[in-house]
Each structure stands twice: as structure tokens, then as C-alpha cells.
Amino acid sequence: TQLLEQSPQFLSIQEGENLTVYCNSSSVFSSLQWYRQEPGEGPVLLVTVVTGGEVKKLKRLTFQFGDARKDSSLHITAAQPGDTGLYLCAGAPNFGNEKLTFGTGTRLTIIP
Amino acid sequence: DSGVTQTPKHLITATGQRVTLRCSPRSGDLSVYWYQQSLDQGLQFLIQYYNGEERAKGNILERFSAQQFPDLHSELNLSSLELGDSALYFCASSTTGIQNSPLHFGNGTRLTVT
């Protein structure tokens, strides 16, 4: 089983601050997805990164896939209360018919 | 709105009982996935169906079973329920059955076993 560890587990910061959360594994993934889940709802896909070293931007969110395709980071600039939620990374296996593996998540709270 | 519909939204039942959770995938999606989410275990993959056939199996207990019908909706059956089965159960769908397909999640069924 391929494991994905996310850090920090919890993060609470003031509105307007910047933050970075991490998704790490010892396994190589063919691609990695980031989801955000709000209370009472299912996870919603934010982005998919495929190429090692790839950087994708979604407004104030910047996603990076590690060169070796084992890790990823999500950087939020000038955090807003609407960014509050559970951020999940999910790795697609590099071979065979293994399932998509979800990380343990980072629960982010932005304080107004 | 993801286009994935799950019913019921909440379910409260007693230990030993059996329940059925229902999922209608997004229009055009052939693959359905079931996940269990609890506070201490995160999002755990249970099972995947593609166009009516089982495609992949995860940490699904023998007391649990699922199927996907010809109209592509899916049901997850949970039997001999235990307190530890209390969790959020999510259904997700994707266009293809390949493992790196983006998933579209429903809003889940919150199961409480008392």
C-alpha cells in the first residue's frame, strides 16, 4: 500500500497570511491530485499535477509536484476565510491497477 | 454541484441491522467508487465499479457489499452493523475507470450506529 503523509495535520492562521502544506510519500506516483473538502460536503478536485517539477496556479493557490514525483506542496497566498477546509492529496499509482491513495489531510482554518 | 447524488443524507440505525446506501453518478460517468471517511482513518477506498462490473477492491469488510446496476447507479449494502461502522460514506464517479481519473464526489451519507 502506498502511503501519503500530509503535514501539518492542523493549521490555523490569520486572514491575509501565506501558508504551505505538504504531501509526502516514499512511493512514486504517476500523478497527484489535490482536493478541498468543506464541512457537510464531499471533496472537490482542485488540480491534477502529472509531470515531475510541474507547477500549477489556481488564483492564490500554487501547486507543485516534486521532481521525483514522490511529493507535492500547496502554497496559499493571502489566505481568505473561504479557503477554510480539509485539504486532501491523492496519488495515482505508477503501475498496475492499484487504487488512488488519499493522504490523511490538512485541516486549515483561516481566522477573519 | 458535482452531479453525484447520494441518498439518504443521514442514517441512524442500531447494531446488528442492515442498511443500503444509494448513489447516482454524474451523467456520462461509467465508474463509481465508494469511500469511507472517519476521523481517525481518513478517506478509505472500499470498492470500484466500472460499467456494471467490479474493477478494484480496497479495505472493504466481508459484511459490506456493493453493486452497480445497468442504469449505472450503485448501492452499498452494510450488514451486521457495529458501532465502529459509524462514518461518512462517500460515492464518487469518474468518466473512465483508470486509476488517475479525477473523481467527482457526492455529499455523502452520514451513518450513525447506536
Image (tube, rainbow, N blue to C red):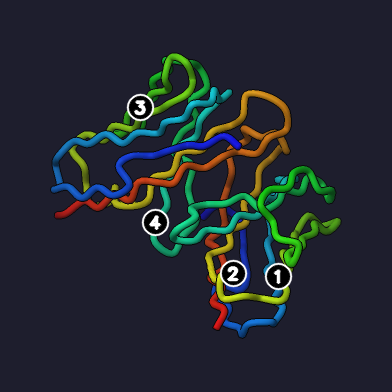
Q: Are marks 2 and 1 in contact (CB under 8 Å)?
A: yes
Q: Horizontally, is A75 left or right of A112 in the view?
A: right
Q: Residues within 10 Å of mark 1 (few under 14, many from 20)?
A: many
The answer for which chain carries disc 1 is B
Q: Nearer the viewer, residue A83 or B53?
A: B53
Which amino acid, mark 1?
Leu
Residue A50 against residue B5 in the figure, above or below: above
Q: Is residue A45 above or below residue A64?
A: below
Disc 3 target residue: A57
Q: Which three-letter amino acid code belongs to the residue tagged 2? A: Asp
Q: Secondary structure at mark 2?
A: helix
Tell me the distance, in whole angstroms, between the alpha carbons under discs 2 and 1.
Answer: 9 Å
Left or right: B5 in relation to A17: right
**Quadrant of residue B114 in the image?**
bottom right
| Identity, as a three-letter code, of the amino acid under mark 3 | Lys
Measuring from the top left, give residue B52's x and y in whole percent.
Answer: 84, 51
Residue A73 place in picture, x, y as percent:
35, 29
Q: Which residue is mark 1?
A: B78
Residue depth check, mark 2 versus mark 4: number of the one nearer the observer: 2
Chain bearing tag 2 is: B
Graded by Cα atoms within 10 Å as few (under 14), some (14 to 19) or many (20 or more), the crowding at tag 2 reads some
Question: Is there one chain holding both mark 3 and mark 2?
Answer: no
What is the number of the mark on residue A38? 4
Disc 3 crowd, CA 10 A, few/some/many (<14, 14-19, 20+): few
Q: Which residue is mark 2?
A: B85
The answer to whether marks 2 and 4 mark residues whose Cβ atoms lie closer than 8 Å is no
User: Marks 4 and 3: which is nearer the front?
Assistant: 4
| Cα distance in 3D space between marks 1 and 3 | 41 Å
| Left-right relation of A59 to B108 | left
Q: Amino acid at mark 4?
A: Glu
As rendered, which of A84 and A24 lies closer to the eye? A24
